[in-house]
Image: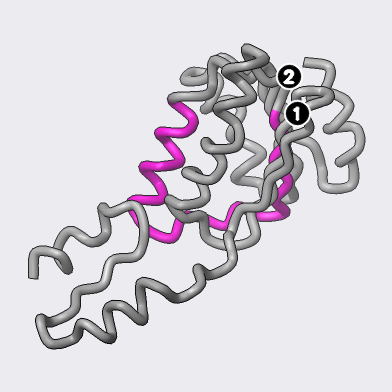
Amino acid sequence: KMVKAFGFAMPGEVRAFGGTDLEAAESWITEAPHAAHLSFELREDDGVLILEPKGSLEATDFERLSAEVDPYIKKAGSLAGMMVVAEHFPGWDDFAALTSHVGFVREHHKSIHRVALVTADRLVSALPRFASRFVSAEIRVFPMSTRDDALRWVAAG
């Protein structure tokens, strides 16, 4: 019962199996993981990180992202910028995903000079005014049709 009660706070999917369900537990734990909901590309030549959410964000998305970005930041000192391309914000899969997202921002915002949000979402368009109080990066919103302009701007950071 405790696993079910606190499973929402765990960084990943949690399932409880009874003592006689060892085979079912082994089968589940060895299944191939599902497709990631956050695709990303780290362009080391110009220090730009491009993120494209493809579904509700999960805690594991931010673990994978940190594993890719942290060694680069340690070596280079910072990223010129980050470009997030999302027609609409997909939200989070669960509370653990939200806290992982907040943790990623908290740990990395001082290492990213510019953030370009390429979107058609009006709510996301309001983010720079709110986020500027909490992050040191310069943030701008670009319409979906100006992705190339956004990339040039963020790379100049």
Residue 126 coordinates in the image, percent (x, y): 61, 36
Q: Is residue 140 above or below residue 25?
A: above
Tell me the quarter of the picture where residue 14 sits: bottom left
How crowded pointer 1 is (Cα within 10 Å; few <14, some 14-19, many 20+) is rated as many
From the viewer's perspective, is residue 9 above or below residue 76?
below
The foreground one among 64 and 133 is: 64
Q: Is residue 83 shown in magenta? A: yes
Is residue 143 found left or right of 1 in the rendered image? right
**Mark 1 is on which residue type?**
Val
Judge by depth and name the residue closer to the eye, 46 or 149: 46
* Element marked by disc 1: strand
Range covered by the magenta-colored residues:
82-106
Residue under label 2:
80
Horizontal side of 10 relative to 130 (left or right) equals left
Q: Position of residue 90 (x, y in %)?
A: 57, 57
Ranked by sequence position, the earlier of labels 1 and 2 is 1
Judging by the rendered image, the residue that carries numbered circle 1 is 48
Q: Identify the element where label 2 is drawn.
A: strand
Amino acid type, mark 2: Ala
Name the residue located 66 percent from the left edge and 39 percent from the top edge: 125
**Residue at the spot x=35%, y=65% of the render?**
13
> Where residue 84 appears, x then y in whole percent?
69, 41
Q: Residue at x 83, y 47 (%)?
A: 144
Residue 129 lies in what quarter of the image?
top right
- Numbered badge on residue 95: none
Left or right position of 82 against 106 = right
Q: Position of residue 74 (x, y in %)?
A: 57, 17
Q: Is residue 153 magenta?
A: no
Q: Are marks 1 and 2 in contact (CB under 8 Å)?
A: yes
